[in-house]
Image (tube, rainbow, N blue to C red):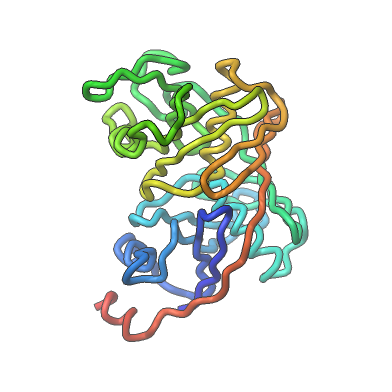
């Protein structure tokens, strides 16, 4: 079974290019970085639906399904444009929404929709919006903002250097906190100026990642809502590199590079051993 692999600033995905009945168990084994092909998820093409030009299912590396992934969608858009001759502008339906995509040789942009802070839209268990709200995490008292981007996000703004924090430990606990019924993506953010923010990412179902598109959008939405960031185009710095997020009345636009890595084929014996 063949896959096309690419990454957006180190956030890598496999696009399934041949018919294969994916299961949560098989996805987890393919994404394993030591005994499989290794990736932050699998993009499974789906029939066009909901009025979109194309469709995709986004698998997390633990075998769960994501509602949306900014970098995953950008990689899928690049694959459609460069490998399947899609036009520069088209739409893709995920399991949760339809997004507009704009692909070129240099960068890929996706329309990520409008953020929501309503608890039911995140979702998060709360009587009202959590914006710079106190949040008890074991012995720690954090200040969080919960935002829905079609998938859930929990943003923690801090003033100190991010790598001085136990953010991986906090991220793992926040991801599975009972107040987030669908689990959540977690971001730790330090504002550098009104149009620049640095972040660290604990991704739902993947753990630490070098970059994330939907996380970048969630942080910018939370930063603008709390007054830390100015509306407009914001530079988001991550360990893997930089993405740009523009927040306007129309919603969020995510821009950045995608680099193709190559095609990979699963050994038939490897697949049989895991399909038995």
**Quadrant the N terminus occupies:** bottom left
In this rendering, position of residue 254 left or right of residue 71: right
**Where does the image place residue 23, in percent across and percent down from the top left?**
34, 64
Eyeballing the image, is 185 above or below 16? above
In the rendered image, residue 102, in percent from the top left (x then y), is placed at 73, 51
Evaluate whether residue 182 shows in this view.
Answer: no
Residue at image position (59%, 54%) is 49
* Residue 241 shows in the view: yes
Relative to 16, is 182 on the left or the right? left
- Choose top left, top right, bottom left or bottom right for residue 135: top left
Say which quadrant the C terminus sits in: bottom left
Measured as percent of width and height from the top left, residue 43 is found at 50, 60
Q: Position of residue 125 (x, y in %)?
A: 34, 23
Q: Which residue is drawn at 31% across and 18% down?
A: 141
Number of dots carrying numbers: 0
Q: Nearer the viewer, residue 90 or 255?
A: 255
Residue drawn at 37 percent across, 68 percent down: 30
Depicted 96 relative to depicted 46: above or below: above
Quadrant in the picture for residue 62: bottom left
Front residue of 120/142: it is 142
Q: What residue do we see at 71% from left, 32% from top?
A: 233
């Amino acid at each position: 079974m063949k896959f096309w692999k690419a990454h957006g600033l180190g956030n890598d995905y496999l696009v399934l290019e041949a018919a294969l009945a994916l299961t949560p168990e098989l996805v987890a084994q393919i994404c394993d970085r030591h005994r499989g092909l290794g990736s932050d998820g699998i993009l499974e093409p789906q029939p066009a639906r909901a009025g979109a030009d194309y469709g995709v299912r986004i698998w997390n590396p633990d075998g769960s399904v994501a509602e949306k992934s900014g970098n995953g969608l950008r990689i899928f858009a690049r694959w459609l444009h460069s490998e399947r001759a899609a036009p520069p502008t088209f739409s893709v339906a995920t399991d949760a929404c339809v997004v507009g995509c704009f692909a070129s040789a240099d960068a890929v942009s996706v329309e990520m929709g409008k953020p929501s802070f309503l608890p039911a839209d995140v979702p998060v268990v709360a009587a009202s919006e959590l914006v710079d709200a106190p949040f008890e995490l074991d012995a720690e008292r954090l200040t969080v903002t919960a935002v829905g981007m079609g998938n859930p996000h929990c943003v923690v703004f801090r003033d100190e250097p991010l790598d001085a924090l136990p953010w991986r430990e906090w991220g793992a606990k926040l991801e599975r906190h009972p107040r987030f019924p669908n689990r959540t993506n977690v971001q730790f953010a330090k504002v550098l100026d009104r149009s620049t923010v640095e972040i660290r990412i604990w991704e739902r179902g993947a753990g630490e990642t070098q970059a994330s598109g939907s996380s970048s959008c969630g942080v910018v939405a939370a930063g603008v809502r709390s007054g830390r960031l100015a509306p407009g185009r914001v530079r988001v710095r991550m360990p893997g590199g930089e993405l740009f997020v523009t927040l306007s009345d129309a919603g969020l636009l995510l821009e950045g590079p995608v680099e193709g890595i190559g095609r990979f084929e699963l050994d038939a014996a490897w697949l049989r051993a895991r399909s038995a």
